[in-house]
């Protein structure tokens, strides 16, 4: 008997932390954007049992013993499937806790990702946020948007032990250009911050550059600083307040149309980070080279990729050439819109035995 099978497709984009990061994990403020050049495409297909299909970050075959050793040293033993499972678990628990009825239907989950690995462009959170979007559409469940990033973060942090904050998940759930205020009283009482979508057109002449050889697990750096923050280390606590102020000033400048203030804030953000984090010489060199070409520059995440501003096309050309000489790829990002990632529902006709 021929029946129709539900198929859900959802997408989450890479993100760049533009100003204020990494204060999101420390009750600060950030300004971030998602962009369309890199993404996770995730599909849920109705099936008889729950299945999770390996994707690009679930490596199970290698060209040689040396590649196996290299990849496991860099990426570890875990891939994307554990993230899909963790989000699914918390989604079903959320529905149960909130009395939300979930239809009796199973799915096969599969994903494709082209976000460069471990260069600070949020590939893992893109997998998780795309999974949540697809699950909500598949089961017809509406979770308040301000709660969605928190659920994604808890899947990574609490279920998988990944050191992370809310910024990446907010950027990928809200999409576009988002200002985030992680006011401590609000976060502690509700589990989420205060999120504001800004006009992407207000952010002009932006570039991103990344070096695929600079892959590094971001949780290592965050873990050390978080301990100092929890111990009320004066330097770290003060720095997080400064990061938040930079993001607030950036938000206010964009809303008021004062684009000329943005490059200085970008550079101040990196200089502050360089004071409290152990920034590697290779990652610092990316910023140094970009600034030498006249552009502003800071990390887009925790290293491996930078984001900043340039003055005109001539400077962008010079910037791209200078960064290419040290192995970096540079491009002008297209900031995503909400319409770019909305989950789509379709039905595919398949043969089933009645």
Image (cartoon, grey):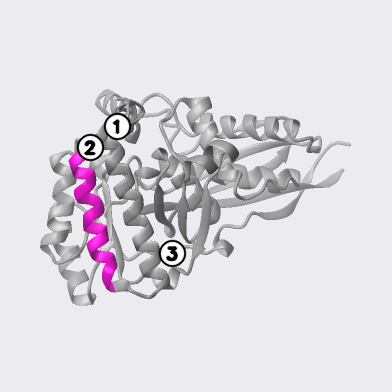
Question: Whole-Å distance between the Cαs marked 1 and 3?
Answer: 30 Å
Verify whether residue 312 appears in magenta: no
Residue that label 3 marks: 335
Q: In the image, what residue occupies the spot 17% across and 38% down?
A: 280
Label whose residue precedes the other's in the sequence (1 or 3): 1
Label whose residue precedes the other's in the sequence (3 or 2): 2
Picture coordinates of residue 279, whole percent (x, y): 19, 39
Number of dots carrying numbers: 3
Characterize the local packing of mark 1: few (<14), some (14-19) or many (20 or more) Cα atoms within 10 angstroms.
some
Picture coordinates of residue 118, whole percent (x, y): 33, 40
Are discs 3 and 2 less than 8 Å apart at CB? Answer: no
Residue 151 visible? The answer is no
Verify whether residue 262 appears in magenta: yes
> What is the quadrant of residue 120 in the picture?
top left
Query: Residue 225 shows which numbered tag?
Result: 1
In this view, the residue in front, 222 or 240, is: 240
Point out the image quarter for the C terminus. Answer: top right
Residue that label 2 marks: 277
Q: In the image, what residue occupies the spot 55% across and 51% down?
A: 173
Q: In the image, what residue occupies the spot 45% across and 25% down?
A: 161
Picture coordinates of residue 344, whole percent (x, y): 66, 56
Q: What stretch of residues is rendered in magenta? A: 260-276
């Amino acid at each position: 008997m021929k029946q129709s099978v539900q198929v859900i497709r959802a997408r989450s984009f890479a993100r760049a932390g533009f100003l204020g990061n990494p204060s999101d994990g420390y009750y600060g403020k950030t300004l971030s954007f998602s962009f369309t050049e890199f993404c996770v495409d995730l599909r849920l297909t109705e099936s008889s049992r729950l299945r999770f299909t390996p994707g690009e970050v679930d490596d199970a075959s290698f060209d040689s013993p040396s590649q196996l050793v290299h990849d496991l040293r860099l990426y570890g033993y875990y891939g994307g499937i554990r993230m899909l499972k963790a989000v699914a678990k918390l989604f079903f628990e959320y529905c149960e806790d909130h009395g939300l009825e979930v239809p009796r239907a199973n799915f096969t989950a599969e994903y494709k990702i082209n976000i460069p690995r471990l260069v600070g462009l949020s590939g893992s959170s893109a997998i998780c946020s795309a999974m949540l979007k697809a699950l909500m559409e598949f089961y017809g469940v509406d979770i308040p948007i301000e709660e969605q990033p928190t659920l994604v973060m808890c899947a990574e942090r609490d279920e998988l032990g990944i050191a992370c904050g809310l910024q990446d998940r907010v950027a990928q759930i809200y999409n576009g250009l988002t200002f985030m205020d992680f006011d401590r009283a609000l976060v502690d009482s509700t589990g989420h911050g205060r999120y504001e979508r800004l006009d992407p057109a207000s952010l002009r002449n932006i570039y991103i550059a990344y070096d695929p050889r600079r892959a590094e697990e971001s949780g290592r750096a965050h873990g050390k600083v978080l301990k100092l923050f929890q111990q009320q280390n004066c330097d770290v606590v003060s720095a997080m307040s400064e990061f938040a102020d930079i993001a607030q000033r950036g938000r206010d400048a964009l809303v008021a149309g004062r684009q000329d203030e943005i490059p200085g804030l970008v550079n101040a953000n990196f200089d502050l980070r360089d004071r409290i984090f152990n920034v590697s010489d290779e990652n610092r060199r990316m910023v140094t080279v970009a600034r030498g070409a006249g552009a502003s520059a800071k990390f887009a995440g925790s290293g491996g990729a930078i984001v900043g501003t340039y003055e005109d096309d001539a400077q962008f050309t010079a910037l791209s050439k200078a960064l290419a000489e040290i192995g970096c790829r540079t491009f002008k990002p297209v900031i995503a819109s909400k319409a770019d990632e909305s989950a789509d529902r379709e039905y595919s006709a398949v043969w089933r035995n009645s």
